[in-house]
Image: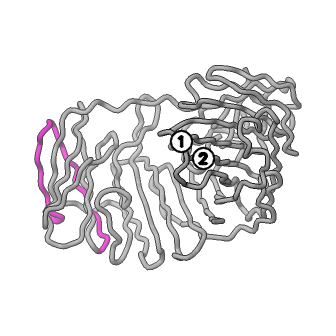
Amino acid sequence: MKPLLGCLALGILFFSCVEDETPDNPVQLDGKLNITVAPGYPSGAIVYWVVVHDLEGNPVGHGQMEPGETMTLELDDSKRYHLTTYRRGEYNGFQMDLLETYSDLAVAEDMTLGLFPSLIPDPAFSGTFQVDVLESEQPYAAYLTSSVGGQNFSANQFENRLEMTMNRFEGIDDYLLVVRKQTGETRYKMLKVTGPDTKLSYRFSDLSAFDKVFKFKKSDFSQFYFTSVAVRQVNGVFKSGYIVNSNRIGNGFDPLLDHELGFLNGIEYYDITISGKRSLNSKTNFSYRRFGPVPASITLPVEHTVQVQSQTLSDFRFTKPAGITNWTAVWDQSDPVTGEPFKSLRWVVIGTEGSLKLGLPDELIALNPKLQDLGKFKLQTIHTITHSHSYDEQMRGKFVEIPKTQAIESATITQSFL
C-alpha cells in the first residue's frame, strides 16, 4: 500500500505536524488510489461513506465502508482530488449526520482514514488530596494540576478560603498549584503529594513568580482566553502534562489590568493556545497556537474580513487573504430545535484554494433527502489559517503517515455568517 496527506491547524492532532513535505523515497504513480478505513474508525458510526470527487466536484468513486476495509480506485494519481466522508450516528436519541470534505488533495500516496498516534494511558487514580488557598483579597482564582495532566475536580469557596480536591495518580507525586489575583498577577507552587488524603494550605505570598511572563492588556480585548500546557516525552511520544497557566479552568474572572501567561524554565516544551476577540460586536475572532520551546515573543493575529462571492457548497468562492495556507468552513442544515426528534446535518470543508465545487452520488443522496439541494446548506463560519507547515504537509500527516513531532505555529481568524 502507498501511504497519504497532514494535520489540521485547528488542532486535530495535539502537537503534531509533519516532517518533510517530500517523502524520502519518490512516490511511484500507478494509476490507483487505495483508501483504507482504520480498524475501529469511526467510533459510533451507524453509516459511513467515502466519496472521491474530481476538481469539478463530480464523484469519480464512492461507496459505503466498514472499519478495516479498503477501497481501490483507478484514477490519474498525478492530479488532485477532493475527498468527502459521510457518517451517521445516534446520540441520546438524536440523529447526527456529518459530512467532511478535504479538498485539493494530492493522491500519489494511499490514504488511511482514522490515522492517529498510539495513545498512552494515564496512571490509575489512588485516592484524593486537598489544597486550600487562604486569601483575604477578592477575587482570586486557583487550580491544581499534575505532571501527567488533569485538574482538580472540585472547588468550594468559604469566605476567604478556597478548598480544592484533586485525584492523586498512582505513582505520581508531582503536582502544581496556580493562583491568580485580581490584578492578573499569577504565582505557582510545586507540590510533592506522596499519598492520598493529604491536606495542604497556602497563601498567595507563599507562592513563587513565574520565570517568564507574557502580558496582554485587558483593555485591548473584549474576550481573551489562554492556556499553556507542559509537554512531556514518554517512550518517544509527546503527551500533555501540567497545565502551567490558564484562565479557562478554575474559578476564573477577568483581571483588572493584564492577562498574564506564565512559563517555567524547567519545562522545555509547551503547547500554547490563545483565543479572543478585540471588538465585542465584531463577527470575527482570532486564535493562536504554538507547540515548541517558549518563544521570545508572541504576536497575535489581527482579525480581517473575508469577502465571499458565493456561499453555496456546489460552487463556493471567496477572496483568499494573502499568506493563508489553508481554511476550514462549516455549513449547516439541521432541523429547528422543536419537540420533534432532532436531526443534525452539518458539512465541514477543509481546503487551500479560494474556490470549490462539490456534488454527491445519487446513492448517498438517497440516504438523506436534504442532500438533494446543496444550496439549502447555510454557511456558518470560515476559519482562515496561516500555518508554519504547508497544506500538503498538514494533509500528508493526517492521511498518509503519522509525522515526527516538530515545532508548529498557526494563527486563525474565524468569521461568522450567522
Residue 145 % position (x, y): 29, 48
Q: Amino acid at mark 1?
A: Phe
User: Do the residues under discs 2 and 1 have CB atoms within 8 angstroms?
Assistant: yes
> Taking 72 as reference, is 272 left or right?
left
Mark yes or no: residue 338 visible: yes
Above or below for 279 versus 163: below
Q: Residue at x 73, y 37 (%)?
A: 22
Q: Residue furthest bottom?
A: 219
Q: Which mark is residue 344?
A: 2
> Taking 80 as reference, is 202 left or right?
left
Indicate yes or no whether the magenta region holds residue 328: no
Where, by quadrant of the figure, is residue 80 drawn? top right
Residue 254 % position (x, y): 35, 71
Image quadrant occupied by the C terminus: bottom right
Q: Nearer the viewer, residue 402 or 128?
A: 128
Where, by quadrant of the figure, is residue 89 drawn? top right
> Taking 277 as reference, is 156 left or right?
left
Image quadrant occupied by the N terminus: top right
Q: Which mark is residue 54?
A: none
Above or below for 415 versus 234: below
**What whole-number distance in Å separates the C-alpha atoms at marks 2 and 1?**
8 Å
Q: Look at the image and give the residue range highlighted in magenta.
A: 183-205
Q: Residue at x 62, y 65 (%)?
A: 416
Q: Earlier in the sequence, mark 2 or mark 1?
A: 1
Q: Which mark is residue 94?
A: 1
Q: Nearer the viewer, residue 89 or 258?
A: 89
Mark yes or no: residue 401 visible: no
Where, by quadrant of the figure, is residue 123 drawn? top left
Above or below for 109 versus 211: above
Q: Amino acid at mark 2?
A: Ser
